[in-house]
Image (spheres, rainbow, N blue to C red):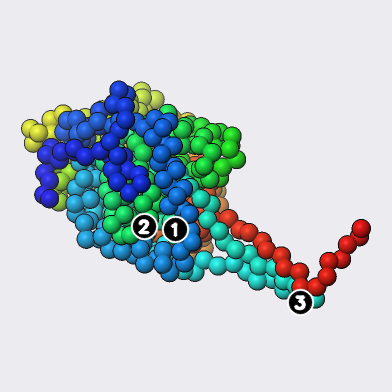
């Protein structure tokens, strides 16, 4: 299937459970889904009601009963087959992702690669899941079993729709769980492709289900008594609500929330790498990335060289048709979001920041893109720590640059935030690099790079950026529970 911007047609139902796509029951509350690059309506998102959510969860539960009885090797074989199919269909999935999300095809292809790598990684971990054997006095002993939780709910975000579905389902399935996944109402298109791929690979019907919907459907999922765990990616306010709803049923929660991450550039850095790092930290997926390093702290002595070069390269970023291989930045997710981002830039100006480039609605030359949601990438200078653009997550292509003098001062300023998702430092001083990494209050710290996310390493937040982890070995602990079995080999000693 070769798709150019503005041509993809979505006709099939976007819900999936019991091993097949499912037509929505009630089409009354449908919401339009847009193609960001053209502004045209791509399809309707029809939310699932109580009955449908219940069907999807029951279907997941029956699949869980079968799947959890398989050995790790048996689960791994099916997961590896799913990874292989994704690899094979990478371009088709990437094009659908681009149409629905607006990011460049170059980036979307990497996202799909990360998705199959994640599934492949957890397929490798599935057969290694094991417990411990503990010797007790008199020949008695105890052992532990790592057991699945049951039905897990995944709630995705709109910035990495397919990748997040893989990041949540792969560790859940490796541990023997089933999953009901709710994509963002703005990006309902690709999760169901993953569901079909898992089915084709050979998972039991119902193991990975997709229900469409917004907050109301999310609430039904979080409150359902058969759900054991909720993993949510999104904003802090919604994360709090998810946690509150899950608390009513004492369900486990993983929260991957927002960020306002610091990127600290010392004067002894390799400047060329620091500049590339700052661009990677701010303009991937049009700046709509939760771990972006949007507060760029630059040591005063190198500020002029840094700004000159960063502005030059930011102006040169090719913005336009996301299906073109040359495009490096494309459309924001929606019109309201674009207006919100432009509002942040306007407010930054009013508060005294200086717009060095970009920050305006952008009109590509191609007439079919005239109604797309494009914003030119923006660099803000003259920023202060108390400005809104420095404190709040903009989630758009906006880099705020701040100067600093000493390590001690910049650490205090970098940590002065309620967020704690990521952070970065550029320096050639090895002791300083590790010292700064140790002192930054964030779940990830990049040294001399930014926004690299190998599936082998854990990702997650400190503070209000959330808790729990995705990727890496540790995530197994968030999708399983430990049972202790105590075995008496002698007689019972009783005080009664």
What is the secondary structure assignment of the residue under circle 2? loop
Residue 342 horizontal side relative to residue 218, left or right: left
Q: Are marks 1 and 2 in contact (CB under 8 Å)?
A: yes
Residue nearest the observer in this picture, 211 or 104 = 211
- Kindly report the distance in space between the C-alpha atoms of the residues bearing marks 3 and 1: 35 Å
Q: Are marks 3 and 2 in contact (CB under 8 Å)?
A: no
Q: Please identify the residue farthest to the bottom as the structure is shown.
A: 139
Residue nearest the observer in this picture, 234 or 12 = 12
Can you see residue 495?
A: yes
The picture places residue 28, in percent across and down from the top left corner, at 30, 23
According to the picture, the residue beneath numbered tag 2 turns out to be 203
**Residue occupying image coordinates x 92% and y 58%:** 496
* Mark nearer the N terminus (1 vs 2): 1
Residue nearest the observer in this picture, 425 or 250 = 250
* Mark nearer the N terminus (3 vs 1): 1
According to the picture, the residue beneath numbered tag 1 turns out to be 67
- Kindly report the distance in space between the C-alpha atoms of the residues bearing marks 3 and 2: 41 Å
- Kindly report the distance in space between the C-alpha atoms of the residues bearing marks 1 and 2: 8 Å
**Residue occupying image coordinates x 8% and y 36%:** 366
Residue 450 horizontal side relative to residue 244, left or right: left
Q: Is residue 161 above or below residue 335?
A: below
Residue 87, quarter of the rendered image:
bottom left
According to the picture, the residue beneath numbered tag 3 turns out to be 139
The picture places residue 23, in percent across and down from the top left corner, at 28, 36
């Amino acid at each position: 299937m070769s798709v150019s911007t503005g041509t993809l047609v979505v006709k099939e139902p976007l819900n999936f459970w019991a091993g097949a796509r499912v037509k929505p029951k009630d089409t009354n509350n449908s919401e339009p889904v847009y193609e960001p690059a053209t502004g045209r309506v791509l399809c309707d998102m029809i939310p699932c009601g109580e009955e449908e959510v219940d069907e999807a969860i029951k279907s997941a539960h029956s699949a869980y009963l079968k799947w959890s009885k398989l050995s790790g090797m048996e689960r791994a074989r099916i997961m590896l087959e799913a990874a292989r199919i994704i690899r094979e269909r990478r371009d088709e999935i990437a094009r659908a992702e681009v149409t629905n999300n607006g990011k460049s095809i170059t980036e979307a292809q990497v996202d799909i690669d990360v998705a199959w790598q994640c599934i492949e990684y957890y397929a490798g971990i599935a057969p290694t899941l094991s417990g411990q054997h503990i010797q007790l006095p008199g020949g008695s002993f105890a052992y532990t079993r790592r057991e699945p939780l049951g039905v897990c709910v995944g709630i995705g975000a709109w910035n990495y729709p397919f990748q997040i579905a893989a990041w949540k389902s792969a560790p859940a399935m490796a541990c023997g769980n089933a999953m009901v996944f709710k994509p963002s109402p703005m990006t309902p298109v690709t999760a169901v492709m993953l569901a079909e791929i898992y089915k084709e690979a050979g998972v039991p019907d119902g193991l990975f289900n997709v229900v469409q919907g917004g907050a109301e459907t999310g609430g039904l999922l979080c409150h359902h008594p058969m759900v054991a765990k909720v993993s949510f990616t999104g904003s802090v306010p919604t994360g709090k609500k998810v946690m509150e709803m899950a608390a009513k049923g004492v369900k486990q929660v993983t929260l991957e929330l927002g960020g306002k991450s610091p990127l600290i550039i010392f004067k002894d850095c390799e400047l060329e790498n620091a500049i590339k790092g700052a661009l990677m930290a701010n303009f991937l997926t049009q700046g709509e990335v939760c771990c972006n390093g949007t507060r760029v702290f630059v040591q005063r002595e190198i500020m002029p060289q840094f700004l000159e070069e960063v502005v030059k390269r930011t102006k040169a970023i090719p913005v336009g048709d996301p299906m073109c291989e040359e495009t490096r930045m494309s459309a924001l997710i929606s019109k309201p979001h674009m207006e919100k981002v432009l509002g942040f830039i306007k407010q930054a100006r009013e508060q005294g920041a200086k717009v060095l480039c970009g920050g305006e609605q952008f009109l590509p030359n191609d007439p079919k893109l005239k109604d797309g949601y494009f914003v030119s990438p923006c660099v803000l200078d003259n920023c202060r720590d108390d400005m809104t653009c420095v404190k709040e997550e903009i989630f758009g292509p906006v880099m705020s640059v701040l100067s600093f003098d000493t390590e001690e001062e910049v650490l205090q300023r970098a940590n002065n935030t309620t967020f704690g998702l990521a952070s970065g430092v550029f320096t050639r001083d090895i002791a300083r690099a590790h010292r700064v990494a140790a002192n930054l209050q964030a779940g990830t710290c990049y040294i001399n790079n930014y926004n690299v996310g190998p599936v082998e390493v854990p990702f997650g937040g400190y503070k209000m950026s959330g808790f729990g982890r995705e990727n890496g070995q540790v995530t197994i602990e968030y999708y399983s529970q430990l049972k202790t079995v105590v075995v008496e080999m002698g007689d019972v000693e009783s005080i009664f």
